[in-house]
Amino acid sequence: MGQADFPSWLAQHVQRVEAALEGWLPAPDAEPVVLHQAMRYAVLGGGKRVRAALVYAAGEVCITSGGGLSPAQRTALDRAAAAVELIHAYSLVHDDLPCMDDDDLRRGRPTVHKQYDEATAMLVGDALQPQAFELLAQMPIAPALIVQSVELLARAAGSVGMVGGQFVDCVSVGLALTDEQLQSMHAMKTGAMLQASILLGGVVAGASSQQRGALEDYAEAVGIAFQVADDILDAVADTATLGKTAGKDAAANKPTYVTLLGLETAGQLLEGLRKAAHEAVRPLGVQGARLGQLADFIAQRNH
Ligand code: GRG
């Protein structure tokens, strides 16, 4: 499993989840047509598919038998990967609304409320969320693993995870958060869904307790690394284009890792988290290398 084959592994798995989403989202001519078209617009309009890739990588790592994933496990991973992307897409649609970040562009295209309208955007998010759980419920694996998967994703997406973190973020505008408070907010807002993607891959693949332990340690590092990288990218992009130094969130008076730590220390934190992610998957042996490569991709991405 060399570094060189990572881009083709990633492209292949992005293609897999795209095909899964394309096939499982409601057809564009199914009633109510506009809602279904808007759901497809929200989900199929690009995106790096990092969360789906984490599901696949974690699942594949946990299958140590020579035969690899069974067709049923492969289908279950497709459903789990599509489910996390549906929740993620819903969160972006709602996050872009005027009552939240009020963004006009997402993934290089008009946001859903700009392309359609606000009520449609709200309902798109509302509809994507239950569809994610429908996909999990239909996974062809042991019922006990389905129940664990549903619970895992529900907790990560809810008030002690993504939605809770978004709430804390919304009410923190203009406040001086401590390092711990910022970390906790991001761990909930973005980290929880990334962590759930990793653990979901393990659950679906029937991971042993030793494998689950390694995935948990890896997930903790990657969950934070993603946000630190995002804050650095935001700050660097703004410095290049606008001459500002701390990024869009900072300009909106939202605390970020860069405003709190400075660019250099944030970069050091990111590198430490990247190394911690590699360390965490060491017990998984040679198979763990894929997760290490994915951690590198998340930490070193340029968008
Ligand atoms: C509104 C319920 C609700 C939750 C919103 C995750 C989130 C919570 C909002 C996203 C806001 C945002 C832009 C956060 C920065 C980090 C982040 C999640 C970026 C977008 O994720 P990527 O880079 O996006 O994985 P793609 O488009 O590649 O899927």
Image (cartoon, rainbow, N blue to C red):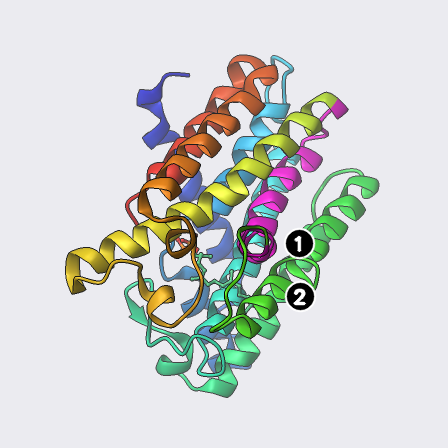
* Quarter-of-image position of residue 14: top left
Relative depth, front residue between 300 and 34? 300
Is residue 98 found left or right of 81 in the rendered image? left
Q: Please state the extent of the stretch shown in magenta in the rendering.
A: 181-209
Determine whether the beta carbon of the residue marked 2 sits less than 8 angstroms from the nearest atom of ligand 1. Answer: no
SS of the residue under disc 1? helix
Q: Earlier in the sequence, mark 1 or mark 2?
A: 2
Prevailing secondary structure class for the magenta stretch in the rendered image: helix
- At which x and y percent is residue 252? 37, 72
- At which x and y percent is residue 218? 57, 31
Q: Is residue 91 above or below residue 231?
A: below
Q: Residue at x 51, y 87 (%)?
A: 119
Label 1 crowd (10 A; few <14 / some 14-19 / many >=20):
many
Circle 2 is placed at which residue position? 130
Task: Name the amino acid, label 1.
Answer: Ala
Q: Mark 1 against mark 2, which lies toward the viewer? A: 1
Q: Residue furthest right?
A: 144
Q: CA distance from mark 1 to mark 2?
A: 14 Å
* Quarter-of-image position of residue 129: bottom right
- At which x and y percent is residue 134? 69, 59
SS of the residue under disc 2? helix
- At which x and y percent is residue 239? 20, 57
Residue 1 is inside the magenta segment? no
Is residue 268 found left or right of 80 in the rendered image? left
Determine whether the beta carbon of the residue marked 1 sits less than 8 angstroms from the nearest atom of ligand 1. Answer: no
Circle 1 is placed at which residue position? 156
Residue 12 visible somewhere in the drawing: no
Residue 195 visible somewhere in the drawing: yes
